[in-house]
Image (cartoon, rainbow, N blue to C red):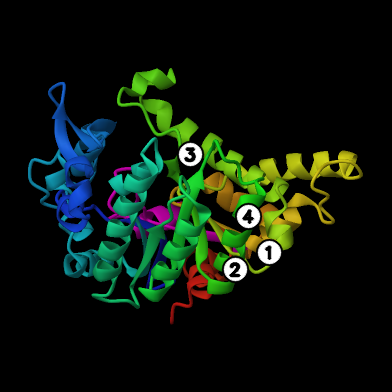
Amino acid sequence: MINIDKFISADGHLAEPPDLWLTRMDRRFRDRAPRFAPVNGKMAFVVDGRPVIGAMKDLLRAIFDKHKERLDLGPGGRHEKVRPGALDPHMRLLDQDMDSIAAEVVYPNMGLHLFGPVDAELQRAAMRAYNRYCAEFCAAEPKRLLGAGMLCLRGPIQWAIEDAWECARMGLHSALITAGIMKRSYFGSEYHPLWDALEDLGLKVALHVGAREDGLPLDRREFGLGDFWIINQKIVVMEHALTVLIAAGIPQRHPRIKFVLAEAGIGWIAATLRLMDHFWEDNRKWIEPRLPEPPSFYFKRNFWATFEDDRAGVLTRHLMGVDRLMWGSDYPHSEGTFPYSRRQIEHDFAGIPEDETRMLVRGNAAALYGIEI
């Protein structure tokens, strides 16, 4: 048995109300605002009249099947049938208590797909509307609900800087930026003022597997992976993001920036860092930019990563740094651990010293986000 009363989840999600963008965006965007609408007989998340992603009916049904032995979720299967705690902060606190959660970092849900192929002005307006909603949601209990806002990177970088300041002013703890391959790479010097601002503000800079610029196809078969597309999504997208940020010298120039890799697991990180270090050792005299330290140095100083069910990552924790890793429940998603988080933690941390277990499931997140425990 794990002798820990409460955990801290470094990765949870809100489920945006269906009318969030219809009611909160400026009137000139209302006809183009994100919404749920039928497309070819199936509900989809639609932005500017274009389906961005299906409403993930199968996954919402899966969470019902997974939890039905303990929870009454109704027939399930649609956005409006999602777990009530994803929409109501007071219900969420009850679910936290049920699952031994002391506090939780909350990310967008469908809002993550606003990072996809969306017009810059519309993207910014939609993200700002979400950020304000998220701040209101978390204000119900700011010591237990820590929000992550979104930054629009399709338009002028000054927009992102202004919105980062607003996120900080509203009490949000993190600012999400785009992950994956981008038309305007993080190697670009135009981002320098943004990194300066984020470092000065002290906002955690989060990258989430769902926040990719190319978006997700409505038909998952386009991945050529069937329903296993999510494995590619988690590892390939975030591995690219980690490599680009370090290779571009961003943590080298900004030692106080704190990057968080959210919901991509951690089992792949040690291998990636070793490959990067090996390349650096053989080529450091000529690669650009010149990195005075091996890539793993910057990960262990500037990066944190979240995971849910990842025994492989737990077993390789010392290769990444025990203080860099944070467990998360991924509430309320079907691949998450709610309401069986304690059981999952006991399985993943079997044989792990309790002091290190405590760091990964509680202490590291508390230290990073300033949570009182």
Please name the residue shown 22% across and 57% down the image: 86
Q: Is residue 229 left or right of residue 200?
A: left
Q: Is residue 150 left or right of residue 30?
A: right
Alpha carbons under labels 1 and 2: distance apart: 7 Å
For this rendering, which residue is in front, 61 or 193?
193
Q: Please state which of the two labelled residues, at mark 3 or mark 1, is closer to the viewer.
A: 1
Residue hosting label 3: 234
The reply to whether discs 4 and 1 touch (Cβ–Cβ < 8 Å) is: no
Looking at the picture, which amino acid does disc 4 mark?
Arg
Specify the segment rendered in magenta. 324-347
All told, the count of numbered labels is 4
Residue 5 falls in which quadrant of the image? bottom left
Q: Please state which of the two labelled residues, at mark 2 or mark 3, is closer to the viewer.
A: 2
Q: Which tag, 3 or 4, sits closer to the chain's start?
A: 3
Residue 50 in picture, x, y percent from top left? 26, 30
Local secondary structure at mark 2: helix
